[in-house]
Image: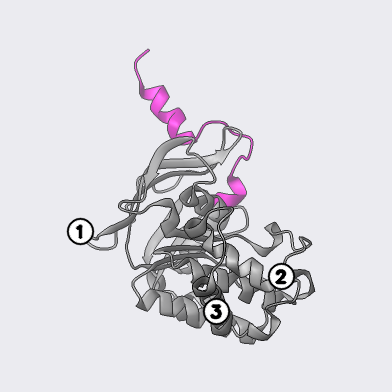
Amino acid sequence: MGRGAVGLALTMSPRPEPAIVFCDLTLGYDRHPAVHHIDGTIKRGALIAVIGPNGAGKSTLLKGIMGELSPLDGSLSLPGLGKSAIAYLPQVIDIDRSFPISVFDCVAMGLWHEIGAWGGIDARRQEAVTRSLAEVGLVDLAARPIGTLSGGQFQRVLFARLLLQDASLILLDEPFRAVDTKTVADLIALILRWHEEGRTVLAALHDIEQVRAYFPETLLLAREVVAFGDTGKVLTPQNLARSRQLVEAFDAHAEICARDEEIREREPA
């Protein structure tokens, strides 16, 4: 794996109220690290873009925070947050849209933590679903199967489901992929509103200009943390070039990081 700044603190202020705490976190698949040695704290209420080249570990990090991946090493914690306090939007390409379900029912799945797998949707909850659909402009499509929607319409459905979850930590994985300009603008407005409400939002993105325009903080990944902090200071040509170099040099088949190997070599026999 590439060697970079190790143990880089993610803390943006001296004593923030933490939303996510990383402790030498390594995540991966089948014992092969995909993102490694992340240390530090992300404060509550932060609005953060997670960027990096393809293969940088952005999706892996979000899945680790969500709990879909267990750490290979180190740990992460969400102080004061239960599982129901997290809302996660995976990449659209990871969602099967062939399932025969209506727009209304797809949004209503955001109530899962509240009503369970077999709970009914009473009048109050039906109103909540309708309000969420109204906020994304899809009330008239409530009965339509999700498989008939355009990419932008379906992404609005997924954001309506997030609205219904009313979570304090929101994780978005490429939320604007293959989405029309009008929908992007409307969804960004929702994200900015969540930020104003004090929710913590992490969004994996690839459009640097969107990041510069709307996200005050940026976490630049290249299988490890390259830089974190004020977006203007992170998105420098030097940092972006370094992130590309680290990803290109990464050995996807390695089972141990170079840093770990160095530590082992220093240990007495």
* Residue that extends furthest to the top in the rendered view of this protein: 269
Query: x, y percentage for residue 208?
Result: 54, 73
Taking the magenta stretch, the answer to whether it contains residue 2 is no
Q: Which of 39 and 75 is in front in this view?
A: 75
Q: Is mark 1 on a helix, strand or loop?
A: loop
* Residue wearing tag 3: 187
> Who comes first in sequence, dot 2 or dot 1?
1
* Residue wearing tag 2: 102
Image quadrant occupied by the C terminus: top left
Say above or below: 228 vs 148.
Answer: above
Q: Residue at x 33, y 72 (%)?
A: 198
Q: Which of 221 and 105 is in front in this view?
A: 105
C-alpha span from label 3 to label 1: 31 Å
* Residue wearing tag 1: 15
Say above or below: 243 vs 179.
Answer: above
C-alpha span from label 2 to label 1: 46 Å
> Who comes first in sequence, dot 3 or dot 1?
1
Q: What stretch is highlighted in magenta?
A: 245-269
Query: x, y percentage for residue 202?
Result: 46, 64
